[in-house]
Amino acid sequence: MKEELIKNIKSFLEEKGVKDPKVNLEYPTHIELGDYTTNVAMAYAKELGKKPLELAEEIKNNINVEGVTTNVVVPGFINFFFNEHYFNKQVQESLKNTHGVFSGKKFFIEHTQPNPFKLFHIGHLMNNAIGESVARIIKANGAEVQTATYHGDVGLHVAKAVWALKKGVEENDAYSEGHKAYEDDVVTKEEIISINKKIYDESDPEIVEIYENGRKVSLEHFENLYKRLGSHFDFHFYESESGEVGKELVVDNIGSIFEESEGAVIFRGENFEPKTHTRVFLNKEKLPTYEAKELGLAEIKKDFFSYDTSITITANEQDSFFKVVEVAIGEVFPDLKGKLMHLSHGLIKLPTGKMSSRTGSVISAEDMIDQVKEKVLEKIADREFTEEEKKGVTEIVSIGAIKYSILRQAIGGDIIFDFDKSISFEGDSGPYLQYATVRANSLLKKAEGVVELSNELPVDWKTTNLERLLERFPNVLSRAGKEYAPHHIVTYLIDLAGEFNSFYANHKIIDKEDSTSSYRLALTKAFTQVMESGLNLLGIKVPEKM
RNA sequence: GCUCUCGUAGUUCAAUGGAUAGAACAGGACUCUUCUAAGGUCUUGAUGUAGGUUCGAUUCCUGCCGAGAGCACCA
């Protein structure tokens, strides 16, 4: 129907003399205005020497597609209303989800990257929620996706923590204690630098043991968290590997791509296209910096998976870093030019100011989950749940609420995190989506043996907004994919859940006496399917009850 | 100083160059003899500023004002 309509308008415009006219059907700003709309009359009025309204009328009169009524509205929109059979069919179609904007493409997606010995803080939580969701959205758009996380298991930050662990400081505080001592005391600073070297050359058995053990404990801890968050990584990379590879690549290309300057080895971004700026790849000690490690990582990733696009997700404070490194990598590996993509997000900040593991005022991912859990527990205190159900529901709802609050906005902006306000259980929130789905699921269960579900259209059925929204799901998914923007899914699901909630409030759905009951049930089922796949794209689970 | 982001209701966020700028929270008024009220219904309220491009600008361009981030051996 849509295609027919577009063809119809296109050929009309071509007849009138427009060369290769672009005709797009869009959703109107308000659902009451029409099911689809087009602005071609306004776009081509000038070229054809007509008034937009006049042209719109002409186009309208030329349209001959069965099941569509057409409307012309100032300033020149042509609006289309499709009949109930269209939606009846499209709702089922939209559940199949067969097309995708990335079909046949291969993506490598890297995110989260917590550092062993350091806290997995709410910034990592944010990165993880976004990374996981972007990966799922791209996959749902037909791509083959491999995911990776990259751990900074060597470097000064590790040495700081090892120094503190050696002194007997507790694990959780090791990094911040070490960092403080490093800044405050010159002797300690030297000591830590020497520990850093010993970690690299493995010359001191005591330090090796502390290091190996701490690394293992940290990584296990991360795995645990990934499991709770529903994150899976196909690959784990480590800076201890990428550093060596990167260093070699830099050394091999000194003179052509890199050059020595003040004892370090640098990449002069000003001399390459696109122009960027200078960055250090090997420091004076000829140790690889973050830049060289990233170069090494590019080589390593290449060998694991021949991707079309490799996406690295980080906070936006690294934007300029990635601009330079991408150019450098493109020089070293010309076949990677144009394949690297850096997706950056804002920061989670506390109302008190910046959240950073260097200032000390850090909240760990677990702290946040626990705090939210307490609130959820209060909320379900009067529910008749077994202890086990309570536990399950609380975990799912808490993590859902947190992920939602991260994914609800465009990823570029900062999130000012206020515990009392940011995590909501009402309205624009994760639990709102979960709740609507749970209620719909519960209806389906209750209907068993009472009313038979049927996709057949009842007589005199008028298309509901619920159907109109369900039909949109595949389009929302492609847009979210094209723009790498999970928040489009969020916005859509909120609209959809709101529509269902009103559908639910205004009709009794399970009703033997009502001939529309079977179809309403089918819509309820379609709703739960779309909600579940949509929430799955966000990495949010749905509890059995809540 | 240079570079890059960003300024939308009281607050937190939306809006593929289009129609009456959408939600949620907070405020006000209703709503559980219908299947989970974490729900539903109604209501008050916003595009920093000055220009430009366009049939049409929250969106694109420029100036100004304001906020944030990054700029050589950390990651």
Image (cartoon, coloured by chain):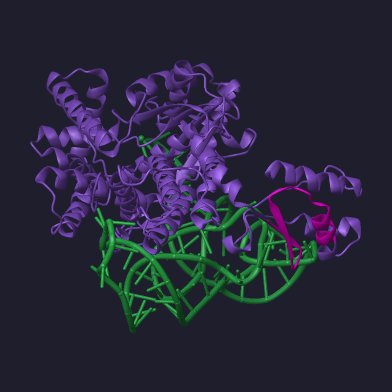
Chain colours: A purple, B green
- Hey, which residue is sitting farthest front in the picture? A513
Residue A491 seen in the current view: yes
> Residue A14's x, y, as percent?
87, 45
Give the number of callouts: 0
The answer to which image quadrant residue A45 occupies is bottom right
**A170 vs A532, nearest the viewer:** A532
The residue depicted at 15 percent of the width and 56 percent of the height is: A383
Please indicate whether residue A244 sits to the left or right of residue A30 in the image. Answer: left
Horizontal placement of A505 versus A458: left or right? left
Query: Quick one: A497 or B4, which is closer to the camera?
Result: A497
| A303 over A51 or under it: above or below | above
Q: Is residue A315 visible?
A: no
In the image: residue A304, left or right of residue A198: right
Q: Is residue A101 above or below residue B8?
A: above
The percent position of residue A149, horizontal first and vertical second, equals 36, 30
Q: Camera-side residue: A210 or A427?
A: A427
State the image quarter where residue A287 is shown: top left
Looking at the rendering, in which quadrant would you find the N terminus of chain A?
Answer: top right
* Residue A158, placed above or below residue A531: above
Tell me if residue A74 is in the magenta stretch. Answer: yes
The picture quadrant where one finds residue A475 is: top right
Span shown in magenta: A55-80
**A51 or A173: nearer the eye?**
A51
In-image side of A381 versus A230 (left or right): left
Q: Residue at x 17, y 21 (%)?
A: A208
Residue A375, x across and y down, in percent: 19, 58
Q: Is residue A307 magenta?
A: no
Question: Residue A463, percent across and down?
Answer: 55, 55
